[in-house]
Image: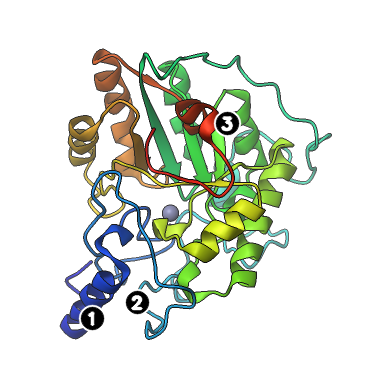
Amino acid sequence: MARSFPRGLAAFTLAVSVVLGAGAAGCARVPPYATSAHPAAPPTAAPGQQVSLPALPAPGIPGGIWTPNPPPTSPPPTSPAPTSPAPTTATPTTQTTEPPTNPAKPPANPAKPPKTTKPTRVNCAKVKCIALTFDDGPVPQTAHVLDVLKHHQAKATFFVLGELAATRPALLRRMVREGHAIGDHSWDHSQFWHQDAAAIRREVRRTAAAIRRATGSSPRMLRPPFGESNAVVRRIARQEGMAIVLWSVDPLDWRDRDTDTVIRRIVKRARPGAIILSHDIRPSTRRAIPEVIERLQAKGYVFVTVPELLGGRLRPGRTFSQR
Ligand SMILES: [Zn+2]
């Protein structure tokens, strides 16, 4: 990634990352549709470190640093074109792998929440709880992740993109049905620091609406793209009834797409009460999950959702990166 990145721009990115603060790294620096043209990311946050940005809009930060939007000539391999929701038959790869559902017909009663598995009733004050989170999906292969979680009786939290969630309501319903939690990760992974408050709010609301249509419930958690938060984002989260959920363990799976590396980093850095960042859109990450769960369960960890991890502390406008 960094190889093709012009040296001058790389230096500039580093400078920008300093401006943004070292904690600005992490969650999905690379949007799901980004390619090798995406620049290297700045250093990552220390565990538990809060990230913050200058007040929006960030002055002096030109566009193109993160190149969020793919060039029109390189369509994403796994995600459908976000701007073309109209019915089409030209996307067999995504349609055929979607879990059984009737794409032509919305859920019979979308307002009715699906039945969920019983709450785990884990007391995280006494048990070694840990929260695994998956960002940037759902993709069709998220179903495999759900299979693994079910097999290991592990709960997780999915921070979904609205543009993908809107096309895969069945997956979201399955998440809820199987006891997982769903959070809002913006509509299309845009850079909040380039947007004004109204645009950020639209992203958050549009995604929340997609989640609500699919599951019957509104999300109570927001994870801003790139984990970038500031006073504007916090205010919007509070007004929209969401807490901001970041993470304390970042295996850098969005950058280092090596399964063994991802396993090693997560297992090594896991702590009771930790929130682990990962990306179900990455094949290398999906392959890591079974062993991550097995090794941590062998150490006595119990995988819970973020709301379970935080208990009753999940309040709108508050920010969490661990228990
Ligand atoms: Zn992300």
Disc on the earlier residue, 2 or 1: 1
Residue most extreme to the right = 108
Say whether marks 2 and 1 touch (CB < 8 Å): yes
Q: CA distance from mark 3 to mark 1?
A: 41 Å
Residue hosting label 2:
65
Q: CA distance from mark 2 to mark 1?
A: 9 Å
Q: CA distance from mark 2 to mark 3?
A: 34 Å
* Neighbour tally class for label 1: few under 14, some 14-19, many 20 plus, Cα within 10 Å: some
Q: Assign a secondary structure to mark 1.
A: helix
Residue 5, can we see it? no
Label ID, residue 12: 1
Disc on the earlier residue, 2 or 3: 2
Q: Which quarter shows the C terminus?
A: top left
Q: Residue at x 18, y 85 (%)?
A: 8
Q: Residue at x 24, y 64 (%)?
A: 42
Q: Residue 12: x, y in percent?
A: 23, 81
* Neighbour tally class for label 2: few under 14, some 14-19, many 20 plus, Cα within 10 Å: some
Residue hosting label 3:
175
Q: Residue 14: x, y in percent?
A: 21, 73
Q: Is residue 214 above or below residue 230?
A: above
Disc 1 marks which amino acid?
Phe
Disc 3 marks which amino acid?
Met
Q: Is mark 3 within 8 Å of ligand 1?
A: no
Q: Is residue 297 above or below residue 24?
A: above
Q: Residue 161: x, y in percent?
A: 55, 53
Quarter of the rendering containing residue 320: top left
